[in-house]
Amino acid sequence: MPVITYRQALNDTLGEELARDPNVLLMGEEIGVFQGSYRVTEGLLAEFGPKRVVDTPIAEEGFVGVAIGAAMLGLRPVVEIMTINFILVAIDQIVNHASKIHYMFGGQVSVPLVIRTPSGGTGQLAATHSQSFENWFAYCPGLKVVAPATPYDAKGLLRAAIRDDDPVIFIESLALYDTKGEVPEDDDYVVPIGIAEVKRKGTDVTVVSYSRMTAVALQVAQRMEQEGISVEVVDLRSLRPLDRPTIIESVKKTNRAVVIAEDWYSYGVTAEIAATIQEEAFDYLDAPVQRVAGLEVPLPYAKELSAASKPNANSLIYAIRQVMSGTKRTR
Amino acid sequence: MAEVAEAAQPLLERATADELKHYYYQMLLLRRFEERAGEMYVKAKIGGYCHLNLGEEATIVGLMAALTPDDYIFTNYREHGYIIARGVPPGPVMAELFGKETGVSGGRGGSMHLFDRKTNFMGGYAIVGGQVPLAVGAAYALRYQGKPGVVIAQMGDGTTNIGAFYESLNLAKIWKCPVLFFIVNNGYGMGTSVEAGSSEPDLWKKGASFRVYGERVDGTDVLAVRDVVRRLRVRAEAEGEPAIIDAVSFRFRGHSVIDSDRYRDPEAVRRGRELYDPIRKFAALLLDHGVVDDAWLKSVADRVEREVQEAIDFANNSPDPKFEDLYKYMYATPVPNTPTAEDAIRAVKINHGEF
C-alpha cells in the first residue's frame, strides 16, 4: 500500500471529489493562485479552474454565509478557513445558521457544507494563532465535527464529509500535515462519521484522544510497552456525534482511563469524555480518570514557555503512571 | 433619489384592473392576518416573539408582484406577510405561529423562522444580518448552475449597520451575484431611529463604496415598489448586477407585539398611520379611477375576514408535534451515535415528572 502524507491524502481527496461531482467547489482565502497557506489545495486551481476553486477575499463571515446559502440550493462547498482562530469571525453563520437550518425549517432543506480548518498550536504562533476551538462546534447540535489523526482517516473522513448532506466541521492539524501513513489506491472507501476506532489494542489502560494527540498517544503506547504497561488507544475521529460505546467498552476492559486533548483543561473535550466514563463505567474504574490538556493561558510566544503550555508525550506518560498507581491528579 | 419614470404612466397602463384588485386583496389579507396574529399573541396562542408587518403591506405585495417562480426570498424575522404574499396559504402560516405540526416549518421554527420549499421562500432569520450572506450564496448558486432567477435579501433598516451586510455587498459585486438587497426602512431599528444609528441615513447610498447601485422608493405605494423591483430584477438576472432598494414605510406599532412604543411621539404615530397607510391610499386610488366601488371593497373585507378566521381555526384544530419526533430533523444524513425517538420519549417522561 502506498505511503503518503496527511496533506497529500487531503489534496488527493479534494481533487477526486471535484472530479466526481460538479456541484463540489472549494472556497477559501489563498487556496487558488497562492495554492493554499499550507499547500493542501496545491495544483487544484490549475486542474479545475476558477469556477471550482474559488479564492475569496478576507471576509470569513461573508463567504461562509455564501457557502451555506449556496449549499441550500444544492451546491456542495468545501470551505477552507486558514486556521481555526479565524473561524470565530464566522461563528454566527455556523452556529446560528448552518447548524439550525435543517431542523428549524422542519427538514425542508439541508446544508451540505464542509469547513476544513487546522486547529491547535505549533511553532511559536502565540496567543491568537494557536487555539483549539473544536469543542465549541462539537457542543452545537446540528453540526458534525470530525478530527482525523492519520492519512487514511483524513481521506476516508473527508470523503464522508463531502458526501454528507449536513454541515461538517473538519479539523486538521498543522503538525500532522507532514506525517505519513498507508492509504490504499483506487479504493473508494469512506470512514463513517460518528465512529471511533481502537488504534492500538491494550489491556492495562485506555488512552482516549483525537487528531494530533492520537499520534502522541500511539508513540507513548509503544514506549510504555517497554515498561510493561499495555496501553489501548481509542481514537475518537468524530467529536460530534461522539462514539460513547467504543470508549466505554474499552474502559470496561482496561479499568483505567487517561484522556488527552490539546485544548484548554476547563470545559474542554477531556471533561466531556471523563464525565462520560464516570457516568457509564464508574463501577469498572480502578482509579480516577486522568486528564491531560493545555495549560490555561493565552499561549505565550517565548519558545520554552510556549512548549511548556501544551500537552506532550511526557505529560501523557506522567498521567498514565498516575492512573496506574491510582493517585489523583495533582495540578 | 433616482428618477422613477414609471409613476408618470396612467394607472390602467401600469396594471390591469384584475391585478390592481389582487394587490388590494393581498394587502388587506396581510393587514387582517397580522391584526389577528397580534390578538392571538395576547391570548397566548402564539409564544416567543411576534413581529408584525402592519403598515408594510405595500412593500411586501409590491415586491412579490415583481418576482417570478424562479426567484428565491430570504427575509428577517418580520416575515409573516412575505410568505403569504409569495403564495403560501394563511392556515399553515398561522399554524406555525401556534407551534403546530401542520405549520410551514413543522412547528420547529415559529414566527421568526417560516420556510416554504415549494415557493422558494428560503426562510425567516432572526439574527440581524444573518440572512444577507445566505441570500448572496443562493444567488451565487444560481449563477454557478446557470439557472434563471434572482434572490431577494430582505432586511430592516437597522441591518444596514452590521458587518455581514457590507461583506455581502462586496461579495455580491465581485462575484456578480443576481441579488437585490431589499431594505424595509420603517425609520426604526427597535427603538433606535435611522438617523441615530446610521452615519448615512440615505440607506440606498450605502452601496456606493462597493459600486452597488441603490434607489429609494415609497414603500407605501405598491405599484412603485413593484416597478422598481421589476426594473432592477432584470439587470440582476441578465448581468449579475446586484442593487439596493430602500423602501420607506411607516411602522404602525412597536417593534414587536409586546413593545409599547414609548420612544415615539403618540401624536406622530397617530398622524403617521393616517398619512402613510398603504391600504387606505390604495383604496382611494382605485375608487378615484373607478376600478372598484364600495360594495367591492366590502366584499373583499368580508372574504379576508373569513380566510383569516379559517386560518385560525385550522391552527387551533391542528395537532402538536409529537414528542418522539423531537430529534426527527436533527440530521439530513443519519449517522450512528445520535439520540433516537426512544431517547426523546424517555427524556420527556422525566421532564414531565413521570418516573
Image (cartoon, coloured by chain):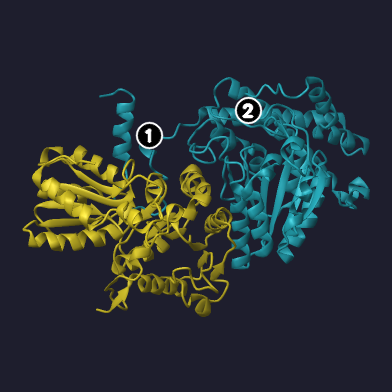
Chain colours: A yellow, B cyan
Q: Image quarter for residue B237?
A: bottom right
Under circle 2, the secondary element is: helix
Residue A132 in picture, x, y percent from top left? 38, 52
Disc sitting over residue B323 in the figure: 1
Amino acid beneath label 2: Ala
Q: Is residue B308 above or below residue B62?
A: above
Residue A186 in picture, x, y percent from top left? 32, 78
- Say if residue A154 shows up in the picture: yes
Give whichever of A260, A80 is nearer the camera.
A260
Q: Image quarter for residue B326?
A: top left
Q: Is residue B182 above or below residue B196?
A: below
Give whichever of A150, A305 is nearer the camera.
A305
Total count of labels: 2
Give whichever of A254, A297 is nearer the camera.
A297
Residue A131 in picture, x, y percent from top left? 40, 52
Q: Image quarter for residue A17?
A: bottom left
Q: Would residue B139 appear left or right of B61 to someone viewing this image?
A: left
* Residue identifier under label 2: B37
Distance CA(mark 2)–CA(mark 1)? 26 Å
Q: Residues within 10 Å of mark 2 (few under 14, many from 20)?
A: many
**Outermost residue to the left:** A228
Q: Would residue B310 appear left or right of A240 to someone viewing this image?
A: right
Under circle 1, the secondary element is: helix
**Quadrant placement of the N terminus of chain A:** bottom left
Residue, x 13% and y 46% (percent of image)?
A323
- Tell me which chain the residue with mark 1 is part of: B
Q: State whether discs 2 and 1 lie on one chain.
A: yes
- Say if residue B187 shows up in the picture: no
